[in-house]
């Protein structure tokens, strides 16, 4: 695995010693102590390598991302340099073997998303698209030539990717997509893509766009790697979508294609139908499941600090109030339960035993519980939560989005319902 | 009552015929029909005058406020002209008798806040401060001279008010306030106010500020009407608080006073302690209780429209899905229950039978349920709710704030708990 | 209206002066006081006649029913004498005009069910079947001869009724019923009923059974008043269903008919299809909506008493704990909101403005909230709630049943969803 | 470990081949399949020995306990023979090393409680008292003589135990207990115990009672093993408590002691204060945390079966309805999350890394979620759930009790709150 990931931290990325708000306790003493930051010691389930990777990622995120996020969120601005930095540390496409990638375990990949999402779900989204959706898709389904040509640059964050599946009229039902790929009327080996994709993270800054379209001849969905540099003016537009309620520290846009040419070699050769995009989503959803636990943990930490510092009524800290303590107790419970479940699924994934329904289960539950608890913890701040400097309002707004993307929760409920009963209830 | 309120709509305020998204059905037919917009016919509890007032307010809000709110919220900008327009229609201080005010019923006053909050809770907040907190306070506790001098101009929206109670370190516990009023060392009949108030709606644009401070000599809280025009430079600062997560279409700020002079005649003569500010809050809270039902109704209307228009899976509208229908059914239930309860308390208030605990009860419940249902309805929009153009995200963000101000919900729970059991549990 | 209902209380029914655990406060004083038992003064919405009827009913229930219920529930035993006593007081079929009935308002009828259900939902169920389902059905749809012959005796509780709609395989979907009525092969003017009804309150003790069956010739559902005395041996069996989890103080059974003869005059002449049974259910559901508020109020009263008396940790009463106070505050809120909504629908019903969806709305919400809050209040009792002497466990078990009968909550959600969206989602 | 536990199933206990309603799938195939009964493959975390133990326990419970439970629950009757049978299989005190006990892992012990609670929480309670509270207590704190004399017979189920901690006035606060032990005025080496314990599972049938009392001389709590055979008439009474709302298949009673003599050798020598009883409770609570997952799994299985078999509206099974599928999806999620967390804590316990707060966390959450989901699943049965033959009502009633005993949920919330914040909020 990547030397970088194992704590060899590039000097350029660190101008100050580590200052984590949430210090991690060690367990050397004889009498075990309860650690509210890891209440059931999930760390005991990790390898030392995974722990080291997690620490590297946490360090980078706390030192380099945290200071930027408030302004970025206010301005609805995403700095593409962030992907470069992540690439420098080996955080991109980290679960891929070879092609300049670190080849770490699924759980280690999840620890990276958790570290990033502890700062901001938008930053994690930008990374997930690059790592899981685009690099993962190319690695799993792309021809060898594409892998060798694109993956190393993507791993370094020099080539940026976007994933074009969702269309304006087909959010939860990608099978009805309207984007079409037809053979070029004159140039052999070239397809022309036409159609519109929306809510595409990174699309305005992407160099390569993994676009899913129906092949005109077969009506079957196929994957195409569109390279922006090869698109004549007017065939590819990727306007940004502004004025978002959440994920404002990530950049989102559309992909508008009008006879946009793609070489046949850029089409995924062996995968047809929804199997392809769903496989990509599966990996990304795993990252979300563990990632959102990071956002929730940050909410817990912020709420706890506030409750200890804020005094009301005879100088008691809010932390002394039963109604406040219950909110904290509920939150750490959901957080550690979600973490343990995600670790288990990560292990099963690496052993080839994970099914998509398992991912649906943890993605749905962890997003739902992260959002729910973040909202409840926000109540501890009272009116002060309205100030964006407390950070919790940002997490609340972000987590709503994580609940809706890559499978809205109700859709995952029905996926699970079908798996439990054998009966489908979508329509 | 005000001629204006009874439908005599100033031409200048209307450039186009009424286009309400939510048309109101009439009940002439023999077979009663279910009206999802008023499921238990709360309208039957209103007088024709109240209905007319409500319609005037709704018309103004839909025609004049709705078109402005999206941009105002984006820019975190509040146009003080709005209070002028509201004044022109007789909507300000409407429950006050005399002094140029309309003298309508408490319920009619609530219908006005509901109409405004149907557009935006921030707009309603700006109006509540002017009407209930400042005009209401002056009317109830102020000396006659102040009433005659200030109330008519405030009713017209020409003099703007702010209400200074909350301090940075004493949100839920105003009894511990630190702002102090001491006698001027040399000028007789003048007090000098020093201290800081925060989260003060309208403070940056206010002409008069109703400030609560402890009289140095007695240690008791007293009310002072600070007039900005009389404050020497450096004695009164009202900086805006920016980058809010919610209520961005209202303006919020601090009040910083350093030996700010106030004439003795501007001190409320007969009210001491928390009784004064709590009486003001009581009126404002009533307006919130009915107001938030307007925001919730708008969420219902928007979600229903979206569910009927958005098609997924075999062309079915989302409205056909059981999980969606349940969200709508839950929301209209909470909405109409909250409306009926608020009407009942309004009647009791006018009959002198209302107690502060009743206001706590409906303020808490209606804010909690409006927020909860708004969040659940937001799920119907899936990822699209992230776009601010759907409006529901704005309501969700606003309603969180309404839940926390003028008594955070947990505080109201403990007020009720004390009233039920006779035992207090604050500390 | 009935002289009896207006407080002329038969001596035989009262052996002791009134001892209500929950005394009702009066409002003579100048400063209004908060009354946790009627937090928003719903009483101000009642006529003095309605108040008097409610008090008569409460007095009977507290004095005569309360002492019996614990043993009855343990033994799963229902004393038919109860209906006689209720009849003596004019409580049966009370909203019917004439035929020996009291002719009171819908709200007054609801106050009676609330008084009975304050003691036990099973007792209220027994009364609802007699009053709303059977007497109401005969009164609305029966031929004059039947009304005159049966209603006076039913009003006195001398003739007992049962309502046969639900079948073993068709709980929420009565339109698929299998019970059939065919013309007698030889006797003119006689129908033979065959089929099985289940979960029929009062069936084992009923003298008359209002049975809904499909007329063989038309396939349409019709109503038949089966009189037990006219049924030859072997044509009608009404075995009791024992070992119930709830409503154990009411008696439940099946109706098994095998060529059970009914005279044509006992068939409802002018109503076909589900309109008939649904009209009956509508009245009964109204009684449930207000009735369950009585059960909830009793839970509140019991939990409050327990919380005040039970001391833990340094001698503090449980009532001092924030987590306990919040449970009580939530419960009184749902209770008074449900009460106000039910009063409003009662008024609309008497004015001919109520629709079935309104009944669905309040039946669903009030049952759901009564059950939810009863469960939460039960937590205050800790392990002690396991003892049946605290009564709250009985309410919890009963209220589950009220949530499921006469329209399970999810079914009412879909009825409302259809009314809101115009789209049906049952299948 | 015990030979018996490893599948060597005594013939006498099995009269028929295994008929589990819920067959366990194996995972030999290449493509992993989703298993709704173990959605995240918790089985992969178990050793083959643990799996074998779990299967032995499940087989016994399904074959021998399940057929008895309905009648036992109806009659509120507990057959002490059950503990003999469990003893014969090595299920009692299974985690204890030596003294005739099996010496299995904590997780294996939890799998046994889960198997028993899949049938009934009352049966599991009876076993938990014997195994964790009494045998565990004697093993951890008792003098060697007592261990050798009592544990083997208890392991065989020939000597039955009860655990006397809770007193009528001190449920959640055992530190205030009133039971006292004073030195015998004349007989040296003998203590006289006086006081009352209540809600004591197994007390009426117990041969030995582990009673906690305050030593008169020190005021400190000490543990005494009271042997019924040594108590003169009138010094020890253990009346049964009848008419319970839940756990009716277990036997519960009081312990009334009046100068009840206990030899000094029967006092735990080295443990003082609440440390002793809390250590015992800690083990029992662990068993509850995994045990309640068995009850929940049985609810899921029963609800799923019902939903597949029950048809409504055009012949669709209930399983086809979205509202039903969501209930099932939610339930399996909470079930597997709770299972994974309990396994993790079991591992930590065996490694000496578990803290009492961890047990509080999983006990609280698993009881709460088991109860909540059981109630929601019960809704699928509609009115039919009132019949005790569907079993789910019994689980619902039982699970309420598990939520309240061995630490009511709110108490555990405050234990966690204290651990998180360092501030205690009990009073």
Image: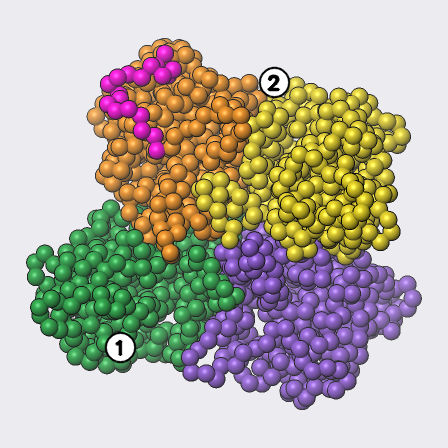
Chain colours: A green, B orange, C yellow, D purple
D325 or D225, nearer to the observer: D325
- Compared with B411, D135 (above or below) is below
B190 or C206, nearer to the observer: C206
Q: Position of residue C301 (x, y in %)?
A: 68, 39
Callout 1 secondary element: loop
Q: Where is residue B269 in the image (x, y as percent from the top left)?
A: 43, 16
Q: Can residue B375 be seen in this view?
A: no
B221 or B153, nearer to the observer: B153
Q: Mark 2 points at which residue?
A: C30
Q: Mark 1 points at which residue?
A: A270
- Compared with C355, A137 (above or below) is below
The residue at the point 80 percent across, 65 percent down is D77
- Compared with A110, C149 (above or below) is above
Q: Does the magenta portion include B124?
A: no
The residue at the point 49 percent across, 18 percent down is B47
Q: Is residue C9 visible?
A: yes
Q: Which residue ends up furthest to the right in the rendered image? A: D233
The residue at the point 25 percent across, 40 percent down is B74
Q: Which chain carries label 1?
A: A
- Compared with D20, A202 (above or below) is above
State which region is magenta: B3-21
- Whether residue D37 sits left or right of residue A41 in the image: it is right
């Amino acid at each position: 695995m990547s030397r970088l990931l194992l704590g060899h931290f590039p000097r350029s990325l660190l101008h100050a010693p580590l200052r984590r708000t949430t210090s991690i306790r060690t367990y050397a003493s004889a009498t075990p102590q309860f650690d509210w930051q890891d209440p059931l010691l999930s760390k005991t389930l990790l390898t030392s390598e995974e722990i080291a990777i997690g620490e590297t990622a946490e360090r980078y995120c706390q030192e380099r991302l945290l200071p930027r996020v408030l302004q970025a969120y206010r301005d609805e601005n995403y700095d593409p340099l962030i992907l470069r930095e992540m690439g420098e540390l080996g955080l991109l496409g980290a679960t891929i073997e070879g092609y300049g990638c670190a080849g770490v375990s699924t759980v280690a990949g999840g620890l990276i998303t958790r570290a990033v999402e502890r700062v901001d779900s938008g930053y994690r989204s930008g990374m997930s698209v690059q790592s899981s959706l685009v690099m993962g898709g190319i690695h799993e389904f792309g021809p060898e030539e594409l892998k060798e040509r694109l993956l190393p640059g993507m791993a370094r964050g020099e080539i940026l990717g976007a994933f074009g599946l969702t269309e304006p009229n087909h959010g939860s039902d990608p099978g009805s997509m309207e984007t079409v790929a037809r053979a070029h009327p004159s140039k052999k080996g070239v397809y022309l893509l036409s159609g519109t994709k929306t809510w595409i993270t990174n699309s305005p800054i992407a160099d390569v766009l993994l676009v899913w379209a129906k092949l005109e001849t077969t009506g079957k969905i196929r994957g195409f790697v569109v390279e922006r540099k090869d698109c004549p003016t007017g065939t590819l537009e990727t306007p940004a979508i502004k004025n978002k309620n959440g994920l404002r520290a990530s950049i989102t846009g559309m992909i508008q294609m009008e006879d946009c040419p793609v070489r046949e070699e850029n089409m995924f050769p062996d995968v047809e139908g929804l199997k392809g995009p769903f496989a990509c989503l599966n990996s990304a959803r795993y990252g979300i499941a563990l990632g959102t636990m990071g956002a929730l943990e940050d909410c817990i930490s912020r709420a706890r600090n506030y409750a200890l510092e804020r005094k009301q009524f005879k100088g008691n800290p809010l932390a002394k109030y039963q109604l406040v303590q219950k909110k904290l107790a509920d939150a750490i419970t959901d957080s550690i339960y979600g973490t343990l479940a995600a670790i288990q699924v990560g292990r099963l994934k690496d052993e080839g035993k994970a099914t998509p329904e398992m991912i649906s289960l943890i993605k749905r539950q962890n997003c739902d519980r992260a959002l729910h608890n973040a909202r409840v913890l926000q109540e501890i701040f009272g009116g002060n939560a309205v100030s964006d400097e407390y950070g919790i309002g940002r997490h609340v707004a972000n987590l709503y989005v994580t609940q809706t993307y890559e499978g809205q929760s109700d859709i995952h409920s029905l996926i699970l319902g079908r798996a439990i009963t054998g009966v489908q209830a979508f329509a």
